[in-house]
Amino acid sequence: MKTVTILGNNSGRNAGDNAILGNMLDDFAMKRSDLRFRVPTLSPPFIRKHFGHHPVEPMGLLPWNLALKNFGLPLYRAMTRTEMVLIVDNILFDRKFNNPFVNNLNMISRIAPLCQKKGIPLVLYNCSIGPVEREPGIQALRRVLDACPLVITRDLATGALLKRHYGEQIPEVVMHADCALNTPLPSEARMDEIIKREGLFSNPKGTIGLNVNAYIDDFNQKGTADRGAFCRAIAGTADRLIEELDVDILFTVSQIMDMKITRQCVDLCRHQDRIRVVGNERYTYQELTGLLSKLEVHAGLRTHTLIFCAAVNTPMVNINAYPKSSNFMETIGMSDWNIEIKDLTEDRLVEIIRRAWQNRVALRELMKPLVNEEKRKARASVDLVSRILDE
């Protein structure tokens, strides 16, 4: 068995991160049976419970493991006692560069030269990079890239960032897609059980989805959105959609920390009897995706709620706070369906969701071939990695 280390946000608290890891392991299992995966994590029990059917070895990142998240002995061992390191999702950025509880780039870049010396390749796997705009971050990313024979990215912005900072002195860059696009759905029996328990989808006019994020500020700039005004705009949008379209509303929470702001929005709504909330504290990423497949339209802040919708051809509106979200929308032909969070008002959000609802059949057909190709590319990354690993 060869050992492959996977570096990502694998705490179990974010359905999008769970989907990346789960689908990635599924993709490798289709092609190879000779790999063991080492997964640094804040929650080894979660990894064992949800992914233990694969050959995974969770490595704790807590103080009794001699670590403060990614600062400490476990990350060093994970990166230096392996045949390959795969870096996934969007963990390489220079925000809060010296805070190991937030930033991964700093510590990974310190160990990367040793990986390079030992001949352990680092591969950026179906990932995004950035923002990286400050000199310490630019130099740190350079050290990571020096140990990388290949960058497999899920968006055009990553390649542009690398070219901007390093010119032609970069590894091979391949444009593929996010692993979460291949999320499988639970059985119909399981979905029926959830729908009955939560009292969902009984309205013949349909249900529209909403998703909000505890980090409502723009990724690069604080202070671009007021929390109170944001919650009032979301609540007003929900009420007006109920009144004007006679639909129900489903708030989907894909990161446990977002439940508080979601409840704040719902508490401001007049029609709470027409609103339901589901989240990943209770349901898996597969189950949340199954629920999103039942929506007419979804509008969300979290990137992976958009990706889950794409996986099941549910039209979506991106409340844009992250470059990776707008980049994804462009990839699947939905670049006209963004609303910037700094420009968000109740009227604007209602208007764009209403238009998406009116065009939902055409939007589904528009997305299907583009999303199917993205799914194929996401899985094709296994072959590229295998060539490097077998060398």
Image: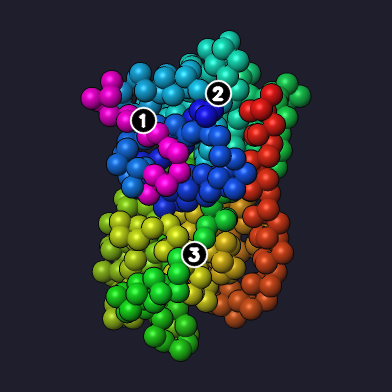
Horizontal side of 83 relative to 162 (left or right) equals left
The image position of residue 297, as x and y in percent, is: 52, 72
Mark 1 or mark 3, which is nearer the start of the sequence?
1
Q: Quadrant of residue 307?
A: bottom right
Q: Residues within 10 Å of mark 3 (few under 14, many from 20)?
A: some
Q: Is residue 234 magenta?
A: no
Residue 330 in sight in this render: no
Q: Nearer the viewer, residue 131 or 156?
A: 156
Q: CA distance from mark 3 to mark 2?
A: 32 Å
Residue receiving disc 1: 59
Q: Residues within 10 Å of mark 2 (few under 14, many from 20)?
A: some
Look at the numbered disc 1 and give the secondary structure of its residue: strand
Amino acid of disc 2? Glu
Horizontal side of 131 relative to 361 (left or right) equals left
Residue receiving disc 3: 185
Look at the numbered disc 3 and give the secondary structure of its residue: loop
Q: Quadrant of residue 371?
A: bottom right
Which residue: 68% across, 45% down? 380
Q: Are marks 3 and 1 in contact (CB under 8 Å)?
A: no
Which residue: 63% across, 18% down? 146
Amino acid of disc 3? Leu
Q: Nearer the viewer, residue 16 or 269?
A: 16
Residue span colored magenta: 50-66
Q: Quadrant of the image for the C terminus?
A: top right
Q: Residues within 10 Å of mark 1 (few under 14, many from 20)?
A: some
Look at the numbered disc 2 and give the secondary structure of its residue: loop
Q: CA distance from mark 1 to mark 2?
A: 16 Å
The image position of residue 113, as x and y in percent, is: 55, 13
Amino acid of disc 1? Met
The image position of residue 71, as x and y in percent, is: 36, 22
Q: Quadrant of residue 211?
A: bottom left
